[in-house]
Amino acid sequence: MKSKWNNNLKGYVRIEIIGQESSSFINTCIQSGIQIWDIKPIDGDRVHVSISVPDVQRAKAILKQNKLKIRIKEKKGTPFLLKKMWKRNGFILGMVSFIFILFLLSNMIWNINVIGANPKTEYELRKAALEIGVKKGKFIFLLPNVREVQRQLTERMGNVTWIGVTQHGTSYRFEVVEKEIPKEKQITGPRHLVATKQAVIHSLFVEKGQPVVTVNDYVQKGTLLVSGYIGKEKKPELVSAKGEIFGEVWYETKVEIPLNTSFQTYTGKFENRHYVSLFGLDIPIYGFSDGEFQDKTETLNESPLYLAKWKMPVSYIKKEIRETDGVKRSYTKAEAIEVGKEMAKKELLKKLPEDAKIKGEKVWQQKVSNGKVKLTMLYQVIENIASEQPIPIQQGE
């Protein structure tokens, strides 16, 4: 079986030997190490034999010595098959070109679907996807993997709770869960303004209603600030109280700052390696160095390749090697306190309404424990503390 496979690979010819000395020719070939097989006598002057292509020239010399003639009957094996195919190179090139173009088209984005988003969110999502390269006509294997696309889109879209990203062949599908912003209840009819939290009244701007507190008054949560009853005491008129009551509110924020920390940063140096994975075997095609980095992190991005709708056992892999630098940071107690103040202030600003203003701050408590500075900060904040409260109307009023 192995000999037959080798003969087909090298190529062989089936020839007819004409002459009286054909047996002498066969014996001489065998003695000279020329491989011949399938010897078939036709009559007294003709014999059919098979000879491999590499031995044809040596066989011709022996035929000439024995004054024999030959006639080639068949040509078989890989060399002749390739030659025959090359004569039809237009067809072969067309077939290869068709498969290549089909392969390219099967690995490009042709459709992007967004589900669960209103028109504004969909527009913002498509814009964010375009910024990271997800667009029609882009090669899929040049994009980050689906998880990375999902992570980047979630970071860019602040008005959504969750974004699901899936890829099906040449299509990307984005499923969006938008944040539910509770609608403010529209209160109709007469109403008071009451305090939302305990505070000291800082200033009042009343458009409608009767103020019942003054500057520097201390109020608790639920305290009446502006009454919806105006006019005479015996026959009051009901209105919808309207205005802004700014109160001085105290907030407490706690933070911890380590005096010594170690963390990693990227130096900006990196190396990229590119592979083609064939049946699980990673074959490097570009970039053969992992970088002379003492500390590094590696990220793999694998993109399977498709032919039409069928997933091929071939994928493109990009490995990114980034150099990292271990950094140690130390603070004195005074430096840690200043850093803690900034951290506490940033945390507080996240909780405050947009129109609130920080009037003052104070370090209420500070101590060093287990290598950390622990701070308790008090903040004096001016903010609108008024909230609408409906006035129940009894029959006859």
Image (cartoon, rainbow, N blue to C red):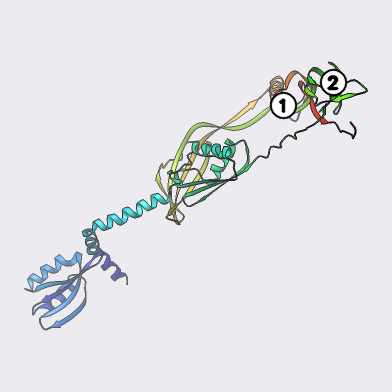
The amino acid type of the residue labelled 1 equals Pro
Pointer 2 local density, CA inside 10 Å: few below 14, some 14–19, many at least 20: some
**Residue 282 in picture, x, y percent from top left:** 44, 51
- Quarter of the figure with the C terminus: top right
Q: Which residue is mark 1?
A: 353
Above or below, comparing residue 298 to residue 341 in the picture: below
- Quarter of the figure with the N terminus: bottom left
Which mark is drawn over residue 210? 2
Above or below, comparing residue 184 to residue 50 in the picture: above
Q: Are marks 2 and 1 in contact (CB under 8 Å)?
A: no
Q: Which of 227 and 140 lies nearest the eye of the viewer?
A: 227
Q: Residue at x 49, y 48 (%)?
A: 302
- Image quadrant in which you'd find residue 345: top right
Q: Residue at x 14, y 74 (%)?
A: 28
What distance separates the C-alpha of mark 2 from that of mark 1? 26 Å
Secondary structure, mark 1, is loop
